[in-house]
Image (cartoon, coloured by chain):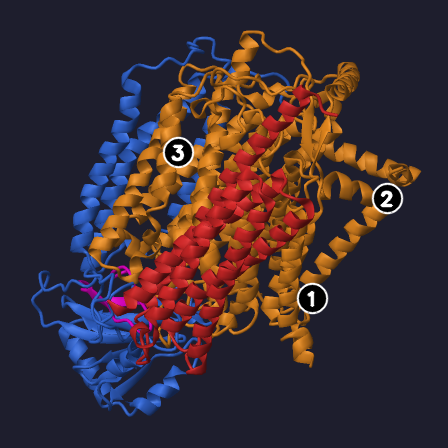
Amino acid sequence: METSIEKSHHEAHEAAANDRVMFGFWVYLMTDLLMFAILFAVYTVLHGNTMGGPAGRDIFSMQLALLETLLLLTSSFTVGLGMIAARRGSKSHVLAWFGLTFVLGLAFLALEMKEFAEFIHEGHTMQSNAFFSSFFTLVGTHGLHITSGLLWMGVTLIYVIKRGLNAPLLRKLALLSLFWHFLDIVWIFIFTIVYMGAFV
Amino acid sequence: MKKHKNPARESRPIWYIALGLLGLGLLIAYLLRDADVALLNPKGYIAQQQLNLMLVSLVIMLVIAVPALFLFYFFAWKYRETNEKATYDPTGRQSKYFVFGIWAFPIIIAIVLAGVMWPATQKLEPTDNLAYVSDAEPVTIQVVAMRWKWLFIYPEQNIASVNFVQIPTNTPVKFELTADESPMSSFWIPHLSGQLYAMTGHANHLNILADTPGDYPGSSAEINGAGFAGMKFIARAGSQADFDRWVHDVQVATAELDSTQYQKLLKPTENHPAEFYALTESGLYDKVLMKYSGSHEHSAGEPGENKDAHSMSEKPKGHE
Amino acid sequence: MKEFLIGRLDTNALPHDIFMILGSLSFIFLGLGIVAIITYLRRWKWLWNEWLTSVDPKKIGIMYFIAGGFMLARGGLDALMVWLQQAISVDGSQGYLSADHFQQIFTAHGNIMVFFVAMAFIFGLINYIVPLQIGARDLASPFLNTLGFWLYIAGVLMVNMFFFAGGEYAATGWLAVAPLSGIEFSPYVGVDYWIWSLQISGIGTTLGAINFIMTILKMRAPGMTLWKMPLFTWGSLLSMIMAVTVFPLLTATLFLLFFDRYFGTHFFTTTLGGDPMLYTNLIWMWGHPEVYILVIPAYGVFSEIVSTFSRKPIASYRSNVLGMIGVAAFALSVWLHHFFTMGAGANVNGFFGIMTIAIAIPTTVLVFSWIATMYKGRIRFTTPMLWFLGFLGIFALGGISGVMLGFPPADFQLHNSLFLVAHFHSNVIGGVLFGIFAGLNFWFPKIAGFRLNEKIGRYAFWCWIIGFCLSFIPMYILGIMGATRRLDHYDSSTGWQPFYIMMLVGGIVIAIGVALQVVQIIASAIEKNRLRDTTGDPWDGRSLEWASASPPPFYNFTVIPTVTTRDAHYEAKRQGLLKPAYEDITMPRNTAAGIYISIFAFLAGFAFVWHINWLAIVSIIAIIVCVIVRTFNDDTEYTIPAAEIEKLEVARLKKDTAAAARTAKVAHPDEDMGLWQFIKIVAIWALDVIKHKRWQTWKHQ
């Protein structure tokens, strides 16, 4: 049995550790952002090199991009609600909201893969020219991050079901929600620079 | 060996270092007695300007470096703990001008250096033609870097040569550099001027002017594969009469350069000997550029248009 | 079927030329030898529990030093091979190396020295010393620490793997510029090994940098504001902030080159829209800051050393810190000066020339700060101080030549010549390497518990200075004579050969210096009773690391000190504030997760080199599983009650007192052991061991 002194010592230790981990995760997110920045820079430099083939404006569907954006924005909203539920300690609400986020993320991925499949079916692969290399790499890397986020979410939710909403899992959900919002912001840039930029 | 520390012997290392460096200097001077130190021996207008710039920047830097290094080693010696006579101030209090001084001096030197560097960079930009140095009729030579040799095409004289280039002295010469089926190479004749990269899909312009007749070695200064060290050529500067005579000799040469022969040349070879061709097909150089510049179709309004870029082929290519 | 199972591996990939055979055999014998010795001494369990799975930054630091030391030998051997080739390959002779092999050797030399030697030693120093300097017990994430180390080891394995499979490394120069490094001009596996050795260790570096930043910003002792931190900690913080900024650039660029080579994309190809100039920009946006990542901690080391051995606080701490910040900030803005000759035009070139000149300002401020620290000090010429004095002359040479190179028109003549090579070696050897040597000599008593032999240390120092001058001053001359770098062959008519021969002699002198440094360590170990550091503070040090024992216990301090000034330990000594006290201590458990993840990372990299797709997929899945298992493991720490700590401290004090008594009893000649004495002692010891078969007593019980 912990005495009250031991308990407050333990809590102070936990709080300091939480603070460190959150800060460290922010630093990691910045490194990830820098990596995306390079991919954006590469896309900006190379997207005109279409070698006589179709450019973005010839093949992108704004409706699709808009729908993907709405899905992701909504999923950020549901993640936010999930975190409120988590801070209140309400396990069932956490599962509901994060579960909904998971579904929305999955829908986003499905749409993106459909778009990629269409392009490939028409003979436009990442080997076709520099434009397609940079497009598939930039958008695909974002999609890969979304996939990792979904995997992370799934595993965490399973542990929430098994162990309940304890302090370490609460921290993991907080980090996950940060990651998810970060990916949403990167998507806004993709939507603006890649999709909208193609039609300007 | 050393049993007791003797104060007089403490200065010994300083003398050893001084003598050692002096000895090394003498050895190097001896080894250089007959040598042709290319960068100190400019034979062209640009190389001369570049040397002047190096010397000026060196002198400016020595103005701050020599006193600083002297103070550094002098203090290290003067304030050694065995020196009873030196004052010791463990508090490390500095005068209020100290911080100002240690920032002001470097900033001033940096401003002077930048003030020398910027105009020199503007003036010695390789793409600028040298009509202001000599009003002789300029010569244009198109250069294709291949593995592992240099092809020189004289479009106005309808000749070509491999690993040998003849130019007239006191005449502005414009080298247009590109590459074909080769990684990046760097075109360098140290006696005449600095280098410039020769890259596929780009035409870099290097303007030089030789003021003294002679044979000057040239090479690729950028590694481009196994045959890199053998990618050497001779740049011969001679009088206008020498140049005209050489051109005439090559024009009547038996070897001919057309697309077929060009394709043969493209195959990788090492330590390629000098060759001379009469040019029987025009526009070879432009064809090389077209081969790669199809890469760069753009839609209008490209972001990042770089107005300062080197001259291009006719196809637009906006950015680095 | 065979292609599915083992990708593009075939019997051709096995060693079949003399150098590959010799190389792989050396590694095999070395490896088998080490395994045999550990097995004989029955130390596997001890090695696994005490060292390999340890998350103690002190132990990880020592492991970095050992690995870095091995790689220093390998990189140095590469350098000697280069010098030997260039001394003899004149006119008709191609020397003893083909052009392609020669190019692989200097490429490997550059990569090994930067990634696997310099980064290793810097990371080792930061790991060991920074927690002690800020009054912390560990880094913020012990798991990331061990993971970063083992990823580095996976990179080391990858950069040596080509001896066994493939037989070639990249022959492109240390940064593998496109399109030379693309699949068209480098079709075989050399560049792929290059990519994956750097990618894996680069990710380790990024994780380590995040960890160090978290630690320095969040785990300082109470009262230690940023403006009271020791200067080595400042240098480490700034360096790691730069690292997290630029290593992601390297990660992205390496992935793009990998995609070009593996998937056939067109980022940096010469056709279908690729842009090789883009690679040049991206790789140097990482490459230039990288060298400052290495040198800024060295500046921090030198600040500590000049202050301690002048017995004065650093002159203008604030200017010193602002100087380091200035260097770090400007370093991010100069990358184009590496390719002025690519033809960006006078305005772009001029801008980057200005930024290059600007970097000289904060650097000079640092130099002035050091000069003023020595002024009216009372200077002791210990070995660390000698390395500092040697550093400045050589570094100044590098700095002046660097600013000359920063003038674009001058650079057009000096780019890719041996002048350039001499310049950056002056800075990297004079600055980074001498900083590492100075730091190791300075903190060795803290790490090992006994100080280093000063006499042999001085011999080693002078060998380095003489060797450096003989090797690199002729190199500046060769550059001015118009000699290009990386040449495997040249004509005697150039007049270069005598200088190449001088450089070879210098290289041999440097090799002797390195050997003497090894001798220095062994000789000190032999005399360790006489050289023992009984107080924890052999130099009358100024910062907190000297407040702990030598070596520190695994928890560093019994109680985290409260700090009120700079030079915290020095002030505490003056005010007599050092008293023992005890509290409960929570420490992290050891973990093998870093090892497992790195094994799979290595396998994934190897699979990518040889196009063994199933292995790549399986390894990546395994990495993900390991990460999940580790991060969802809540039981990663344990607590030691205060009473237990008190018992440990009392026992340690007893041991130290006994050791001090032994030290007092040992005969005290005035001087450290000399070289001849060392040889005699080792010979006598070796004969004794053989005669009495003493190795049987070394087995672990």
Q: Residue furthest top?
A: C575
- Residue A155 in the image: state x and y as whole percent: 62, 54
Mark in front: 1 vs 2: 2
Instruction: Identify the mark at residue C42; answer none if there is no mark.
Output: 2
Residue B102, quarter of the rendered image: top left
Amino acid under disc 3: Met
Q: Chain of mark 3?
A: C
Work out whether mark 1 precedes mark 3 in sequence or the reverse, and give the earlier one: 1
Specify the segment rendered in magenta: B190-219
Residue on which the image places disc 1: C21
Which residue was labeled with disc 3?
C324
Which of marks 2 and 1 precedes in the sequence? 1
Farthest-out residue, left: B135
Residue B205: within the magenta? Answer: yes
Up the image or down, A86 lies above or below B31; here it is above
Residue A176 is marked as none
**Magenta region includes residue B275:** no
For the C terminus of chain B, the image quarter is bottom left
Chain identifier of the blue chain: B
Q: In orange, which chain? A: C
Q: Nearer the viewer, residue B183 or A154?
A: A154
Eyeballing the image, is C273 above or below C161? below
In x, y percent, where is residue B101?
27, 23
Quadrant hosting residue C238: top left
